[in-house]
Amino acid sequence: MPQASGVVSLLGQSPVLSAVLRLVAAGPLVVLGCIWIVFALLSPYFLTASNLTNILVQSSSVGLLSLGALVVVIVGSLDLSLGSTVGLCTIAGAVMFRDHPSASWLVVLAVIGTGLVIGAVNSLVIVTLRFGNAFIVTLGMLYVVQSLSEVASGGTQVPGLPSYVLAVANDKVAGIPGPILLVLAAGGALAFLLNRVVWGRWIVAIGGSADAAARVGIPVRKVMFSAYLIAGFLAAVAGFLVAGLNDAGAPDSGNSILLAIAAVVIGGARLTGGHGSVWATLVGAVILGTITNGLTLLSVSPDWTPFAVGAVLIAAIGLDTLRNTIEGRLRIRQAQIQAGA
């Protein structure tokens, strides 16, 4: 985290606190490493190349969805409809292919277009019309989109998708599975937007204080509108991948967005906005995938998986609180040194 490293560099006089802060700042990686060590000790099959690859593939759809959730969280908002958006996108693609098999290229337009339309509707209602807060509006949209999914699919899976969709989800390039490459491409593109483009600085500023951002000339409403569009687009990409992995379109119960938000929080983002990391968020998604995979290898009942996820989520929040406490102590120490000088 940039601010943490800045404080550390200023306070060579506090090596112990500096070392602890560096360790805490790498929280998601530390948590992932600890979990991997535990499962490796408990199962000889965990650290095999094939199993680690399976973890990354299984984490890919949540990873893509968590990137969409991250954009909205950084801007200081929330979108609970992203999970159900994934479901409707898969159905839109499968229905399009079922009804127009000779025009398979329409599947991409149907999937991406569905995600963008839902993102635009959220933006219109929340940003333009200002109907209530984002939590309530997107919760309502979750149920609306779920209902549309049930109606469009008839309440069942819609099997069959074009070969190129299946290839992206199941083939490998240079030995690397397509889902992993898709997540890396999406993560790299989003990291570029957040860190190298002025738009990224704008959403961080808005997440910190929308009023202050507006006073310095940042187009707050336009940026927030774009954040929901990008979130909808990333949900559509996740839907494209899910459809390819399952070779079918199916309604989403909405639980996937809870996992995505958990990945965002485990990755160190603040739900109050203004802070978040693409790669730490993806590590958070891998942590969730690791928990599911490890418990399965140990033949633990799936009923315990939510317990483990919740425990890790609480630990991640505690780690972030610890980081803030240590950073505060370092800043006080810095002030004392400067005052003494």
Image (spheres, rainbow, N blue to C red):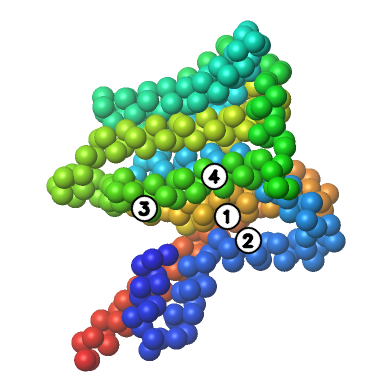
Q: What is the distance, in whole Å, between disc 1 and disc 2 at their CAs?
A: 7 Å
Q: What is the distance, in whole Å, between disc 1 and disc 3 at their CAs?
A: 21 Å
Kindly indicate whether the residue at mark 3 contacts the one at mark 1 (C-beta within 8 angstroms).
Answer: no
Horizontal relation, residue 191 to residue 310: left or right = left
Residue 148 horizontal/vertical position (percent): 53, 15
Q: Give the structural element (helix, strand or loop) at label 3.
A: helix
Q: Earlier in the sequence, mark 1 or mark 3?
A: 3
Residue 313 placement: quadrant: bottom right
The image quadrant where one finds the C terminus is bottom left
Horizontal relation, residue 151 to residue 58: left or right = left
Residue 218 horizontal/vertical position (percent): 21, 44
Question: What is the number of the mark on residue 283?
Answer: 1
Q: Give the structural element (helix, strand or loop) at label 1.
A: helix
Give the amino acid type for the residue marked by disc 1 in the picture. Answer: Val
Query: Which residue, given by chain and number where applicable, does mark 4 sit on?
Result: 185
Location of residue 158 with respect to 17 vertically, above or below: above
Query: Which residue, given by chain and number where applicable, does mark 3 sit on?
Result: 196
Give the amino acid type for the residue marked by disc 2 in the picture. Answer: Leu
Location of residue 56 with respect to 330 vertically, above or below: above
Give the amino acid type for the residue marked by disc 3 in the picture. Answer: Arg
User: Is 13 in front, or is 320?
Assistant: 13
Q: Nearer the viewer, mark 1 or mark 4?
A: 4
Give the amino acid type for the residue marked by disc 4 in the picture. Answer: Ala
Question: What is the number of the mark on residue 32?
Answer: 2
Residue 338 shows in the view:
yes
Label 1: how many residues lie within 10 Å, few (<14), some (14-19) or many (20+)? many
Question: What is the number of the mark on residue 55?
Answer: none
